[in-house]
Image (cartoon, grey):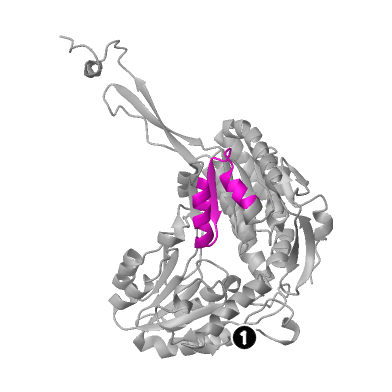
Amino acid sequence: MDQRFDVTERFADGAQYIAGRLRQGGSEGTHQVVDPATGEQVFGYRLAGAADVDAAVAAAEAAFPEWAGATPGERSDAMHRFAAVLTERADDLAYAESLQCGKPIKLSTEFDVPGSIDNVSFFAGAARQLEGKAAAEYSGDHTSYIRREPIGVIGSIAPWNYPLQMAAWKVLPAIAAGNTIVLKPAELTPLTSLMFAQAATEAGLPDGVINVVSGTGPEAGEWLVSHPAVAMTSFTGSTAVGKRVAELATSTVKRIHLELGGKAPFVVFDDADLEAAAHGAVAGALINSGQDCTAATRAYVQRPLYDAFVAAVAELMASVRLGDPFDPHTDLGPLVSHAQRDRVAGFVDRARGYATVVTGGEIPGGDLAKGAYYRPTLITGAPQDSEIVQSEIFGPVLAVVPFDSDDEGIALANDTPYGLAASAWSRDVYRTGRASRELRAGCVWINDHIPIISEMPHGGVRASGFGRDMSAYSFEEYTQVKHVMFDNTAVVRKDWHRTVFGDRQT
């Protein structure tokens, strides 16, 4: 295995990053970061407790006046330096991400790390584009204009599937808009969030602008969400936990941004390019071992293409190379933990009672047995209302369902509680146009599935949450709009005053 640095030595001072310094957690509990490819423990740390959250929030509060008062250009310059430091640390970031998550190094190197750095560069520019409605005399007697102002201290919770990218998605729009932040990464995967915050300090961002508390949801997470000095909560994770976050946040009337679960449909019409659709389905279903809330999990294929699509996908899945995440030829790494692997296996095992496992559906043996590996799995014959079609599995599993009419295909695609992402495959511009309008999702891809870019928003509808990450639209989440109105008349007694006291002047 590629040993770029010793994790224990790197984080010897602790896994909490508060006011620009690493420190030990104050909770009585500890946690072990485990390499899911081997099952070996690679780093142990003291978890954050309520006192650590208090300290991090206090650091963010102390840093807020200076950071919010900086000019957009000053914030932009600092973030450009931040991108440069991350670029210098790219190899270390990729190593740490693959170590804690089990991602193939080619995914960390070519997707997670460069995508996160690109996010920093984008928001460095976007920091100078905080615009409101142009000044005008809407009442006739007054000039009105809009100010976009930072909200305050943001308390964000990120998931374990994309620790570095989710840290970036939470932190960057918040600080670009002038807020300060306390981020709680998943306790399974804190390493790259800590490295991200350290890089910000190296780049010259003031201490306390970015703070990280590594702890459990029930202890550190719930107190962060409930904290009276936190002005906004942003959460990415499951819909069930998102409901709990919303309950806690409303107790102090916080602004809430929720990016929750997904069950993305992959709709293949009968005039689609079969080869392109099959390749897109395998890539879209297996990215990050299927641990992606926008992963293709339900393929609806119009009946004339159904058999050929199933055969093509099965053949491609059988060719996918499982192995050591640090082998550059590995296509699919382990799931994030043995518990997650067993959860996925449970879904597939239960599906055997009502559906057909065409390929995969097993835990590999041999050298891979000690890791949290699961073979790419293709399932057919599952009813629309079955668990395997309706529930978020978060693993390398694709269910394929046939449909007849276009109306039926779109109706089936919309028939889950979720609405995060979807794709439609067809050579007919009118079919794809209809699909783009009628598929209920925050993102609809046409003849592709998964690509994301910094300039465009990411987020869902319905049970997939609300609000947007990335893009200039994310400033809607992280700024508050203030209307400023100037009287232009210098008249002492306004005509409207008579509606409160006195008579009209003649």
Q: Is residue 239 magenta?
A: yes
Three-letter code for the amino acid on which mark 1 is drawn: Glu
Q: Is residue 191 magenta?
A: no
Residue 349 versus residue 470 in the image, above or below:
below
Q: Residue at x 78, y 71 (%)?
A: 40
Q: Position of residue 417 (x, y in %)?
A: 41, 66
Q: Residue at x 42, y 70 (%)?
A: 423
Please say whether residue 470 is visible from this viewpoint: no
Q: Position of residue 221 (x, y in %)?
A: 62, 52
Left or right of residue 471, residue 483 in this image = left
Q: Secondary structure at mark 1?
A: loop
Query: Quadrant of residue 402 in the image?
Result: bottom left
Q: Is the stretch drawn in magenta largely helix, strand or loop? A: helix
**How many numbered markers are drawn?**
1
Mark 1 lies on residue: 362
In this rendered view, identify the residue nearer to me: 407 or 214. Answer: 214
Left or right of residue 138, residue 350 in this image = right
Residue range of the region highlighted in magenta in the rendering: 220-249
Q: Quadrant of the C terminus?
A: top left
Q: Position of residue 382 (x, y in %)?
A: 44, 84
Query: Quadrant of residue 97 in the image?
Result: bottom right
Q: Quadrant of the N terminus?
A: bottom right
